[in-house]
Amino acid sequence: MQAQKLEVAIDSIRVRFGSQALTRAAELQPPQPWMSGTPVDHLTGIGGLPRGRLSLFTGSGTSGKLTLALALLASATREFAHAVVIDGGGFDPWTLTSFSPEPGALTIVRAPAPEIAGEAAATLARAGVGFLLLMSEIPEHWLGPLESGANRSGTVVVGVIETPSRALAHASSFSLGFTRSEWVWERGQLVGLRALARCVKNRVAPPVGETELEICYRLGAQSVKEASLWGPHAEGMGGVEPCASAVV
Amino acid sequence: MRVCCGLIGHFELARRPDLYGTPVIVGRWDEHVVAASEEAQASGVLPGMALRQAEHLCPQATFVLPDEEAAARIRELVSAALYDLAPVVEVRDEGIAWLDLSGVMNPGQSIRAARHRLLKAIGREPRLGLAPGPFSARLAAARARPGRLLRVADAREFLAPLPSRELPLDVEQRERLDLLGLRTLGAVAAIGPRELESQLGRDGRHAVLLARGFEPDPLEAWRPPLFTSAHRQFGEPVEDREALLFVARALCSDLADELGLRGAGAKYLRVRLVLESTESEQRESLVRHPLSSTAELFGLVGSWIKEWQPRAPIAELWIELPVLEAAGRRQLRLWAGGDGSSEEVIAALERIQERFGHDVVWKPKLA
């Protein structure tokens, strides 16, 4: 009798608010990966960045997180009809050129205030944009609409934030912390850096360890190389596809 | 014409699904019974009788005060739920839903869907009738078992043995029919319309046409609401912009709740300020992407109010939504997963430009 009443209540909610308003845990689909072709795919534990979830790249300046995000953005412009950057100020699209992006798919939303960034991100995620790169903080009250919008449409949302707020960190499903381990010098010239990318949060799979990335600063087809890796998935890291990098 | 009728009980009763299966009487003290559950009707309680009399007949019943507004909301919900099943849908507070299935490709599928949706909306199996018109379909439904459909091919033949009290006549007219010996619809159908008109007036003629299965009453099609508004009158004229924004947000919230209830979105927005001098100022805009949430509505309304320079203190604030997107479509698009299309994204970008200026969105030309 109780089960029948529960069924009726669930059905009423679905009739009233829509079929997706209430979902049983058993009916939930596992997060679908978007294979970006970067070493990050192996750190998520599902073979790619989770669609419909918020991924965060954090760490201090010059730790390589933006370079990796640009590589992801360029890859997204080739794969999706729309890749959007929500820019809080300071994003230079020409840094993207050496990653060979598809310019027709790229749109930049200049958001001088966090409120604009939040509303734009939530609106675009709900509309079903393929890839969303957040370059600034989002106000806490926009995180819910952003999450639910992305969840419904399957948008890949990546945030590049030096020190995220507690709310943003809590809202993210996957978080990578970047630390520069050393500069790379060649013939007395600074040519890049080595950075440690460590998975600090993972809601989509068991937390995987960390990897070291070598990020080259020169123009041309240099690569973000994976130098070494520690963690439970270390044995699966043999054939990493390199991706292009750019001068930052 | 093929009409399907679903009987689900008065919507006043549907407000209290926890009392299903028990005798319930809805009405105000010293007034008449508005609705009575089947269990109460079994004790002789009928809608329209004095509440005191109903209490004598069924003292064990639960007495509930009517709430016309809540019942009307349920009626709107049921109408919206059935809207896409037939070209003409009529729902009444008494818990009667009619669907005119003329021209529907697969009427059986519509009837099954109607049964399913009524069950989900009300929580009880509807009784269903299918007949050539609304009157015969309602009587057929009343004789069907819950969750079952009673089909009527020939309305006159079906109606003939039924009692004449089923006709929509008042007590006095029914008594006169009884005195005339017209106790069945077949007997009423047998006499001429003019003869009964001379006894009962125009209602007599109407009754004969109903009894003969001519179905003189067309259905009144429910249409999704196309206009809604909210307003606030200030006791003292307001000059403070923050106060105005506060009230505007509350009004947007009320409108968003209403739109959510109807599954609709606003395609046109108008804000009107009635000034102390009784003059008014207004601003309006067509929005490409329909607005439905508080944030969306207040986003636009708030941006207007922030830069508005009214000539005098404001006595009244109106927010009007004169063009709504039809029910059904909006909700489907809101909740369908993975439905993002290029058109939707472009519309969303245009809306961001409408809200924050053209320069906010930029498509770089990378050489």
Image (cartoon, rainbow, N blue to C red):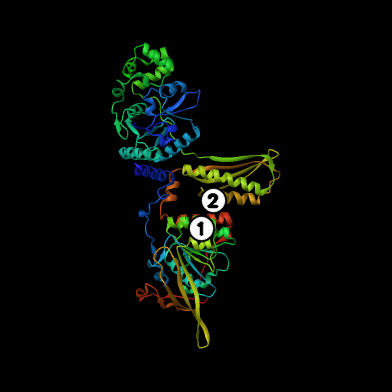
Subunit under mark 1: A
Quick one: SS at disc 1? Answer: helix
Residue B172 coordinates in the image, percent (x, y): 43, 15
Q: Mark 2, residues whose alpha carbon is within 10 Å: few (<14), some, or many (≥20)?
A: some
Vertical side of A116 occupied by B157: above or below: above
Which numbered dot is residue B81? none
Quadrant of the snapshot with the N terminus of chain A: top left
The residue tagged with tag 2: helix, strand or loop?
helix
Residue type pointed to by label 2 = Glu
Which residue is under mark 2?
A: B296
Q: How many marks?
A: 2
Residue B91 appears in the picture as rendered: yes
- Image point 45% across, 47% down: which residue? B330
Q: At x 57% / y 42%, what residue is drawn?
A: B320
Place of residue A216 in the rendered image (x, y in percent of width and height, measured from the top left): 48, 79
What is the chain letter for disc 2?
B
- Report x, y in % for residue B149: 30, 33
* Residue B158: x %, y % from top left: 29, 24
Residue B134 shown left or right of residue B71 in the figure: left
- Residue type at the position of mark 1: Leu
Pointers 1 and 2 in contact (CB under 8 A)? no
Residue in front for this viewpoint, A221 or B17: B17
Splitting the image into 4 quarters, where does residue A114 fall? bottom right
State which quadrant residue A152 falls in.
bottom left
- In the image shown, does B260 or B26 lie closer to the viewer? B26
Q: Name the residue carrying label 1.
A: A143
The mark lying in front, picked from 1 and 2, is 1
Q: Nearer the viewer, residue A190 or A20?
A: A20
Residue name at image x 32 percent, y 33 percent: B146
Does residue B74 sit above or below A132 in this rendering? above
Badge 1 local density, few (<14 within 10 Å), some, or many (20+)?
A: many
Q: Is residue A163 above or below residue B343?
A: below
